[in-house]
Amino acid sequence: MPSPMRLSRINDRFQQELAMMFAKNEVRDHRVGGITVTGVSVDREFSYAEIYVSAVEGVSRAKEVLQGLESATGFIRKTLSDRIELRSFPRLRFHWDVTPEKADRIEQLIASIHDEDKKRNK
């Protein structure tokens, strides 16, 4: 079992490599263009890597992006295994991350509260 620090470094490395792959358009599926890797969590046994992604367009692209990633999983896993040296390489599971949309909504609510306060104080 890896130490928590080593697992954290592996997660970070996965995220960096995936971000570079998507930024350089190494995955040639048009469905995965313009996505952001928001997080990676590799389990302690290296069985699975949970990969969280999002896009600027929001949840409207979720289904399309996840289908593109599922079809490219073999290529992505092979490329990552060439770049990251691990004894056993985890299977990749992609998930849509709704955190950016939620954060945007919270910011909108806070801004509207500030606007209402300004109007009351005038």
Image (cartoon, rainbow, N blue to C red):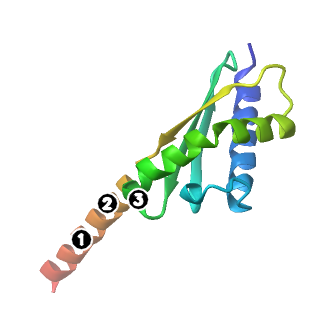
The structure residue drawn at horizontal position 35% and vertical position 63%, both measured from the top left corner, is: 107
Marked residue nearer the N-terminal end (3 or 2): 3
Q: Amino acid at mark 2?
A: Arg
The structure residue drawn at horizontal position 50% and vertical position 51%, both measured from the top left corner, is: 65
Marked residue nearer the N-terminal end (3 or 1): 3
> Could you say which quadrant of the image residue 89 lies in?
top right
Q: Residues within 10 Å of mark 3 (few under 14, many from 20)?
A: some
Numbered disc 1: secondary structure: helix
Residue 113 lies, with reference to residue 22, above or below; the image says below
Label 2 to label 1: alpha-carbon separation: 11 Å
Q: Amino acid at mark 3?
A: Gly
Q: Residues within 10 Å of mark 1 (few under 14, many from 20)?
A: few
- Asked whether, in this view, residue 30 is left or right of residue 55, the answer is right
Q: Nearer the viewer, residue 113 or 79?
A: 79
Residue 86 image position (x, y, % from top left): 83, 26
The structure residue drawn at horizontal position 57% and vertical position 44%, both measured from the top left corner, is: 69
Label 3 to label 1: alpha-carbon separation: 21 Å
Q: Nearer the viewer, residue 77 or 15?
A: 77
Residue on which the image places disc 1 = 112
* One can see residue 99 in this view: no
Callouts 3 and 1 close, C-beta under 8 Å: no
Residue 115 lies, with reference to residue 63, above or below; the image says below
Residue on which the image places disc 3 = 58
Q: Tell me the number on the disc at residue 105.
A: 2
Numbered disc 3: secondary structure: helix
Marked residue nearer the N-terminal end (2 or 1): 2
Residue 109 lies, with reference to residue 19, above or below; the image says below
Q: Amino acid at mark 1?
A: Ser
Q: Residues within 10 Å of mark 2 (few under 14, many from 20)?
A: few
Q: Quadrant of the C terminus?
A: bottom left
